[in-house]
Image (cartoon, helix red, strand yellow):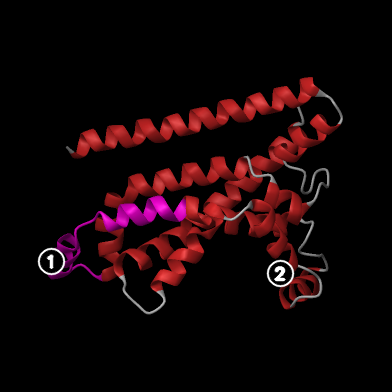
Amino acid sequence: MDWIAFKLSLSLSLWTTIILLIIGLIVARLLAWRSFPGKSLIEAVVALPLILPPTVLGYYLLTIFGRDTLLGQTFESLTGDTLVFSFTGLLLASVVYSLPFATQPMLRAFEAIPNDLREAAWCSGLSHWNTFRYVELPLARPGIITGAILTFAHTLGEFGVVLMVGGNIPGETRTISIAIFDRTQAFDMQSANTMSLVLLVFAFVTVSLVYIFNRRHSHIVV
């Protein structure tokens, strides 16, 4: 078992989840409550990683993060390090790739909140921020928690985007999925099987928790 790669994967998943909780809330609430020109285009962009092959997305992210681009040059001038083949680049790529897994459950949760409740809160004297804090967030909590769990689990098992953007640098960008690929290529099936089993159990437990949580919440609502 490559514990260093597993620890790096956990760190990547945790930071990706934290970032996407913030971004996901903003994007989901915007798409749920606002109508504006280009909304369908933004919805399509947000959902694109769901159907785009990871290697294709990874290729374009690798191109965008490259040293010849404005983003890559700016990052290198500020940090002295390249954006590609680094943990930071890996994190940015994971945020892009896991965006729909965080946003979609939150979006559905916000859309399920009746607009009458928000208007009643405003009529009761609550500000827009307090309405969001005390009315919308508690009602959307199941979608938020589901999005966080799915984001964490999905990021933990990333392969294509991780390999394209981060490469295979031990202790820096070698995640557990890359380690499994390495062990398989080296015909070390025992190690590959152990690491694969860990991810399989983790994925099963994660999905089970999502279903259990949603079922209990639906019973409470009823």
State the predominant SS element of the stretch in magenta.
Answer: helix
Query: Does the stretch in magenta take in 124?
Result: yes
Could you say whether the residue bearing mark 2 is in a helix, strand or loop? helix
The mark that comes first in sequence, 2 or 1, is 2
Q: Which residue is mark 1?
A: 124
Q: Residue 107: percent from the left, percent from the top?
A: 36, 57
Instruction: Report the disc number at residue 64.
Output: 2
Percent of width and height locating residue 90? 70, 55
- Badge 1 element: loop
Dot 1 alpha-carbon crowd within 10 angstroms: few under 14, some 14 to 19, many 20 or more: few
Residue 108 placement, left or right of 86: left
Q: Type of residue at label 1?
A: Ser
Residue 72 position by quadrant: bottom right
Using the image as rendered, state which of residue 31 and residue 51 is in the foreground.
Answer: 51
Tags 2 and 1 touching, CB below 8 Å: no
Alpha carbons under labels 2 and 1: distance apart: 48 Å
Residue 9 — which label?
A: none
Quadrant in the picture for residue 192: top right
Query: Residue placed at 37% from the left, 68% from the top?
Result: 30
Tell whether 78 sits left or right of 138: right
Q: What is the quadrant of the C terminus in the image?
A: top left
Q: Position of residue 7 (x, y in %)?
A: 70, 38
- Image location of residue 151, percent across then percent down: 52, 47
